Amino acid sequence: MTDYYEILGVSKDATKDEIKSAFRKKARTLHPDVNKAPDAEEKFKELGKAYETLTDDNKRATYDRYGEDGLKNAGFDTGGPFAGGFGDLNDIFNSFFGEMGGFGFGGRPDPNAPVEGDDLRLDIEIDFKDAVFGTEKEIKFDHLENCPECNGTGAEKGSQPVTCPTCHGTGHVQQVMRTPLGSISQIVTCPDCRGAGKKITNPCKACRGQGKLEKERKIKIKIPAGVDNLSKIRVSHEGDAGSNGGPSGDLYVVLHVKPSEYFKREGNDVYTRLDITPSQAALGDEITVKTLDGEQNITVQAGIQSGNSITIKGAGIPYISRPSQRGNHIVVVAVKTPTKLTEEERNLYKRLYEIQNNAKIRPSVMDKVKGVFNNV
């Protein structure tokens, strides 16, 4: 049986103030952001359940008399305030303790520290051959650049941002909030400067105080040989401009490769289909096929079957990490049965059919067949 009094570390005749004090003390040490033990979250939820029950007069009376099962039978919700999961647990804890800031758990970032700009994504389409052998491509995209008029400060020339008088440049202010636990001091984002720590009294007319302007940019990028569909190319510092002197973000170019009508890619190998006639399959042949590097002669061995393949080694897709090495070109053979025959072709196929069928009947078998007919 779960003992709520034991969980909180109070006696059974503890007052509400004593229960609240015990909860606040234990909550600081059991919160999963502070306590990295595997069972910290579960213990914190149990602590919340105990607190909620013992600070409610009706629930406490039922619990004291019938225990936890009595609460369930009486129709009380026994999930506790943190039953919704870790996200709810944090939301409630933050409402009590001001995002941990009121108790000094971790420092807050300096609002005037350099901040890196946002990364950007650009999707472009390239031809199959360009993906195979690589190419150089000019791309156009929009990104945020520091305003040249104010050098990114957001303030009109001849003026400077001033320290926020509300938060004194910290970007945060302390508030006192009344909760079920009593008055709690919490740290919140400054409502005056919205966490920036400074205010612009005379905004730049070019960028309207934003410090950045959207500009179109053209650059050339190298697409390496062997890239595949949805491959990404990172172009450093071509994203949006940073703040407070921070670096620009990166640009990620996502490649969409147009499919080839002739080649099918699987990894670093390419596949093509070769249609041959029954006579070519039976007798073999030298056939010219199209490869990534141009036309090439291949040998079709006599007796090849439909579905068999011929491999041209090293004629596939280059490996990005090892461009000098390539996959293979695999030619899949398909024996095509003719659907329209000339009279000469029909006679030849009939003659071939007769020869092949006569060859299937051995002489000894033929003698037996003749004997049967002679006796009729």
Image: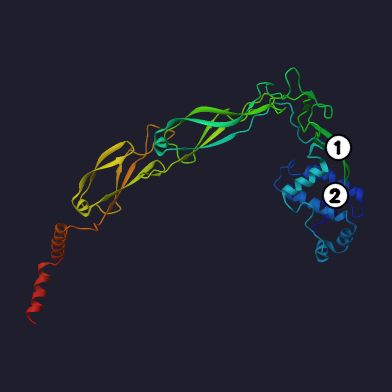
Residue 58 % position (x, y): 89, 60
In the image, residue 324 above or below residue 58: above
Q: Which mark is residue 106?
A: none
User: Can you tell which quarter of the image residue 66 is in?
Assistant: bottom right
In the image, residue 172 above or below residue 202: below
Outermost left residue: 374
Secondary structure under tag 1 reads strand
Amino acid on which disc 2 is placed: Gly
Left or right side of 308 for 71: right
The mark nearer the N terminus, 2 or 1, is 2
| Whether residue 249 is visible | no
Neighbour tally class for label 2: few under 14, some 14-19, many 20 plus, Cα within 10 Å = some
Report how far apart the C-alphas of labels 2 and 1 lie in the structure: 30 Å
Tell me the residue that label 2 is attached to.
9
Q: Which mark is residue 175?
A: 1
User: Can you tell which quarter of the image residue 34 is in?
Assistant: top right
